Amino acid sequence: MISSFIHHYASAIQLRTSLYMEVLRAKRFGNKLPVGINRKIMKEPQTHEEFIWLLRFIPTNADVNIIDIGGNSGYWAEEIMSYYVSSKVYGFEPVQEMYDQYKARFQFRNNVNIYNSALGDTVEEKLINVARTYHLTSFKTYSNDLEEKNENFTRQISVSIDKLDSYFSEFEFSDARKTIVKIAVQGYETYVIKGGLKVMDKADVAIIECSFINEYKNQLPTFGELVTILRELDLHPVCYGVWDRTRGPIAYERNVLFIKSKYFSSIWK
């Protein structure tokens, strides 16, 4: 019991300290950060860590495309826009209730485009399992070892699936604009990327939810396959989230930051 307590608080201190150090570095390089960033790190470090990762590679004054796949109600997009104020957001959310909330959140912003669609490697209508709080909504069901998590699903609905590459012309790609892609679709990430290779090739960085164990039924962990696919697009994993770190040494599900090799030198600065 005491060792568990020590491990938990040691991990909490280490995470917050590392994020504070990254923030100090970002400020030295002239980045303007959201008001109250230190308080946010103290209160919700796991929420802000991936935004703080980005500061090493993309300055906050950059013009940015943000492609938000699995957008939910738009809360993630709203948060990242507080870091990158000169951004255009393209959000994808298939569940009508969450799409409506996303749209309402940004109803007075003309730099946010929202699409009521799921993304994959096919164009079709498909049943999706809607979770009670929406965050775990997935085309997949959980493996036998995690069977109890299937109780989060309350109903199935039919949604439209399209390919990310179908929207290629919607995005304002240019040498002057950076592109950040975020994919969090509960086990469907590989399908999204296979249907969006042209878009992913344009990404400077990508934040992708990855599984490292048998999280979903009839599906191997996604991380290994994603690394293989993304390496061909010159995207490489460099940062790993801490969501499951207090559970033990074995990775379960983590957000992973992939970057283009041209940004490797920023790691050493």
Image (cartoon, rainbow, N blue to C red):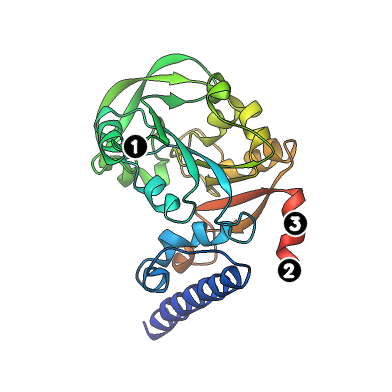
Report the Cα–Cα distance between label 1 and label 3: 35 Å
Looking at the image, do the residues carrying marks 1 and 3 touch, with CB atoms under 8 Å apart? no
Q: Count the labels in the image.
A: 3
- What quarter of the picture does the C terminus occupy? bottom right
Q: Is mark 3 on a helix, strand or loop?
A: helix
Residue at 47% across / 74% down in the picture?
A: 16
Residue at 63% across / 34% down in the picture?
A: 200
Q: What residue type is labelled 2?
A: Lys
Q: Where is residue 240 in the image (x, y as percent from the top left)?
A: 57, 58
Q: Nearer the viewer, residue 213 or 208?
A: 208
Q: Position of residue 196 (x, y in %)?
A: 59, 27
Q: For mark 1, what is the residue?
A: 137
Which corner quadrant of the image does residue 89 belong to? top left
Q: Which amino acid does label 1 sit on?
A: Thr
Q: For mark 3, what is the residue?
A: 264
Looking at the image, do the residues carrying marks 3 and 2 touch, with CB atoms under 8 Å apart? no
Residue 167 appears in the rendering: yes
Q: What element carries label 2?
A: loop
From the image, state whether disc 2 or disc 1 is nearer to you: 2
Q: Where is residue 212 in the image (x, y as percent from the top left)?
A: 55, 49
Badge 1 crowding class, 10 Å Cα cut-off, few under 14, some 14 to 19, many 20 or more, is many
Q: For mark 2, what is the residue?
A: 269
